[in-house]
């Protein structure tokens, strides 16, 4: 595990510490081994955040994925298989982004 500072929910305190190896470490803490499908969504989330300065919650995330990656990849069940029970929150965490505002 890299020497990175996390808040009490496991999000990076300093997002500038993020890099792919940090993403792998954060994913590992969630019991996830990243594959190409994860990286597609991580890249998409980071670009979206860079352009909008917001982190999408579940429904906007699904809409974004549907528009950019296809409807099949945006289904809740698919996202839960990739990122667990709280896909928007976990995907944001692994992407080095802040917690989506309405995620518990």
Image: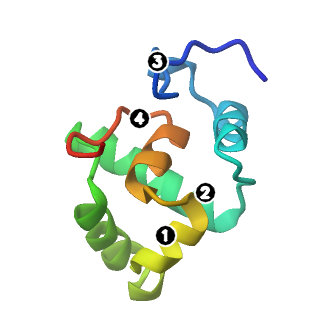
Residue sitting at x 30%, y 61%: 58
Labelled pair 2, 1 in contact (Cβ < 8 Å): no
- Count neighbours of disc 3 (C-alpha within 10 A) and say few if under 14, some if 14 to 19, many if 20 or more: few
Mark nearer the viewer, 3 or 4: 3
Which mark is first along the chain, 1 or 2?
Answer: 2
Q: Name the residue under label 4.
A: 97
Between the residue at mark 1 and the residue at mark 4, the CA separation in whole angstroms equals: 17 Å
**Above or below: residue 47 compared with residue 1:** below
First-in-chain label (3 vs 4): 3
Disc 1 from disc 3: Cα separation: 24 Å
Q: Which residue lies furthest to the bottom in this view?
A: 72
Q: How far apart are marks 2 and 1 (CA)?
A: 13 Å
Q: How crowded is mark 4: few (under 14 residues within 10 Å), some or many (20 or more)?
A: many
Q: Name the residue under label 3.
A: 7
Residue position for label 1: 79
For label 2, the residue is: 39
Image quarter where the N terminus lies is: top right
Between 50 and 88, the residue placed more toward the observer is 88
Tell which circle, 1 or 4, labels the residue nearer the N-terminal end.
Answer: 1
Disc 2, SS: helix
Q: Are marks 1 and 4 in contact (CB under 8 Å)?
A: no
Q: Earlier in the sequence, mark 2 or mark 3?
A: 3
Indicate left or right for 96 with 37 as reference: left
The answer to which of marks 2 and 4 sits earlier in the sequence is 2
Asked if 20 appears above or below 90 in the picture, the reply is above
Disc 1 is placed on an element classified as helix
Label 4 sits on a secondary structure element that is: loop
């Amino acid at each position: 595990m890299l020497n990175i500072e996390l808040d009490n929910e496991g999000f990076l305190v300093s997002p500038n510490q993020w890099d792919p190896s940090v993403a792998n470490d954060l994913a590992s803490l969630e019991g996830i081994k990243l594959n190409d499908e994860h990286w597609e969504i991580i890249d998409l989330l980071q670009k979206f955040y860079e352009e909008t300065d917001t982190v999408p919650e579940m429904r906007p995330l699904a809409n974004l994925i549907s528009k950019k990656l296809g409807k099949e990849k945006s289904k809740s069940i698919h996202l839960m298989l990739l990122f667990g029970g709280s896909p928007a929150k976990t995907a944001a965490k692994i992407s080095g982004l802040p917690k989506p505002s309405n995620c518990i």
